[in-house]
Image (spheres, rainbow, N blue to C red):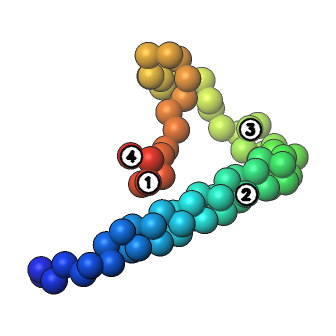
Amino acid sequence: RMTKVVRQDSAMIESLKEVTKLFEEAQLSVFKLMASDSVPKFMKSSKYEQTLKTYAFDSIPPRRNNALGAPERSMSRSNR
């Protein structure tokens, strides 16, 4: 649905940029916390250890990585 153009477009864009930055900072904080706390705890857990012992990893074909050989990373919508 079409709406009227509001003369406060630049203010709205600035506000959206600030909100986007805030969410990106929060995302980074969560990723850092997960990397330093949640993931190491999970990798030490008996459930993960049991999975490693019982799962046939040799049956999984290798994944194709990008041209640089690095794993793909998802991007936030603001970076697309």
Are the residues tagged 1 and 3 within 8 Å (C-beta)?
A: no
Is residue 70 something one can see in this rendering?
yes
Left or right of residue 27, residue 16 in this image: left
Separation of marks 2 and 1 at Cα, in angstroms: 17 Å
Identify which residue is drawn at 44% across, 47% down: 79
Mark identifier at residue 52: 3
Identify which residue is drawn at 44% across, 16% down: 67
Nearest the viewer among 70 and 16 is 16
Q: Tag 4: residue type? A: Arg
- Dot 1 corresponds to which residue? 78
Q: Which of marks 4 and 2 precedes in the sequence? A: 2
- Dot 2 corresponds to which residue? 29
Q: Which of marks 2 and 3 precedes in the sequence? A: 2
Separation of marks 3 and 4 at Cα, in angstroms: 35 Å
Q: Which of marks 3 and 1 precedes in the sequence? A: 3
Identify which residue is drawn at 66% across, 38% down: 55
Are the residues tagged 1 and 4 within 8 Å (C-beta)?
A: yes
Disc 1 element: helix
Are the residues tagged 3 and 4 within 8 Å (C-beta)?
A: no
- Dot 4 corresponds to which residue? 80
Separation of marks 1 and 4 at Cα, in angstroms: 6 Å
The quarter of the rendered structure image containing the N terminus is: bottom left
Identify which residue is drawn at 72% across, 44% down: 51
